[in-house]
Amino acid sequence: MRLYYQITTQDPVIISQSNATTNNHNTCDFIPGSAILGALAAKLYPELAEDQSKSWNIFHTGTVQFGPCYPLVGREIALPIPASWHIEKGKLAFENAKLNEQTINIPSVFYDRGETQYKQLRGGFITSKGVEAQVKMGQVTKTAINNKLGIVEQGQLYSYSYIEQAQTFVGWIEAPESYKSLIENALRQVTRIGRAKNTEFGRVAVTPITGKFEPPQSLQSQLVLWCAADCEFLDEFGNSSLSPSGKMIDSELDEVTLNKDQSYIRSHTIARFNQKRQSFDSQTQVISKGSVLVFDLNGQTLSQTILNKIAADGIGINKQFGQGWVMVNPNWYDAEQLTPSQLYSPLDVEPQKLAADCGEGESTLLAWINEHQAAEQSKTSAKQDALKLLRKVEKAYDSARGFNNIGKHLQAGPSSNQWSRIYELVKADVENWNALAFKGEHCICKAKNDEFGWGIEWQGQTGYTNFAAAMDAALTNESTAVMRLFLEQLCRYDPSTYNGLKSFKAYLSTQPQGGN
């Protein structure tokens, strides 16, 4: 059973191409299956603690395959551009986001093109109708902070590239029917993926959807496998292989051999991090997505059952990471000159938001506009609510300092570091952050033994109150989005000091009065 889902980036998302520590982290322009595997493992491992055999089957045996998430264009998943496609040098492969019809498929490296020089298309995504899927990327430069001194760490400057927010990708998970409800429920709980999840990166919304895919067609004398994801093979000695034999594809392909002249194979090296040993595994070479593997049948007849099996199960090893997904005998392979009518059998899905929000006769464009208007209204509302909370905090600090006649050289109320402890809970999307902050004997905001911090008192409209009680009443029912904006601004100041409160009040004086 194949479960499809859409994933929409609510914040920029960082999925590094390599786990190595470098100055510039290059980010994938898609979301790999390993990222979804890790997110689901974080949700399900605690739940399956008493049934470790089930967690082992889901995440380690390859029984469950986590496919990569590629861009959604309309109602179709875009796939990696095949490595056998070429365009004449000096010309663009796409014009107005549509495939240039002068793009050609070169099935043989020895094909005579005369004096015309062609360049290989080595990246990007395309739909079955020849539409280019454009993934918006960005880059940010950051610096490490010295935790002891609270200042910039010298010589610790680094850059991240990232997938921008408000983009939708679609992926799939191949799993037995018995795991469907478990995985589907865990998918709905995934809220963050990628690196730097404790800062402003990584928030996503995941929704299961429906999808369908047509079975592959058969060719007379060849088997063509277009790698929709990276593929990894091991030879008989356990070494990485970039020239797979027929038996590596399926045990029944005895006579099938790889045609190296007509295949276009690109590769890269990976080293996975082993969490158990807290170190990297040995480097392995994998065939990169977009590669084209052409096999000569040598008289062997392939049944539709074998073709369907290859398309459904994939090829190679480590398929639990999303590797091994291939398109079998795509339509474009038969054509030397590409015509973007139907390049391959499309993988159609039913996007959840369009299915729910679009009424009869309503266009996709209108649905997109309504969606973005709703998102902007939500952001504006959250900013206004956060500003109201900031003004309440300002009033509390003023009341505490004035009622207790605190001098300019003394602190009054919780410090910036104390607020930061709550901010860490909110950034980590801890569901019961308010209980950990305000409830119980071991909560963060304890009035007891903190006379001039959380426990400082003043006379309010309904009697005496303290900082912990006032903030509990003001913050407990606020949403995570509002709390993130509120604490992000508040933690830039230290209102417990006279000068810090002065700077905090100066900032609020520049904000719209609508937040009152």
Image (tube, rainbow, N blue to C red):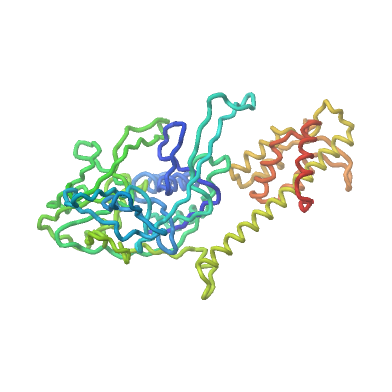
Looking at the image, the residue that sits furthest to the left is 299
Quadrant in the rendering for residue 221: bottom left
- Where does the N terminus fall, quadrant-wise? bottom left
Q: Nearer the viewer, residue 304 or 262?
A: 262
Whether residue 452 is visible here, answered yes or no, is: yes
In the depicted structure, whether residue 417 falls above or below residue 347: above
Quadrant in the rendering for residue 438: top right
In this picture, residue 47 sits left or right of residue 34: right
Q: Nearer the viewer, residue 412 or 55?
A: 412
In the depicted structure, whether residue 255 falls above or below residue 282: below
Q: Position of residue 439 (x, y in %)?
A: 71, 42
Q: Position of residue 213 (x, y in %)?
A: 34, 64
Q: Which residue appears at 24% of the width and 64% of the height?
A: 217
Whether residue 1 is visible here, answered yes or no, is: no
In this picture, residue 291 sits left or right of residue 169: left
Q: Position of residue 475 (x, y in %)?
A: 73, 47
Q: Nearer the viewer, residue 462 or 55?
A: 462
Q: Position of residue 268 (x, y in %)?
A: 31, 39
Total number of numbered discs in the rendering: 0
Quadrant in the rendering for residue 496: top right
Q: Which residue appears at 58% of the width and 40% of the height?
A: 199
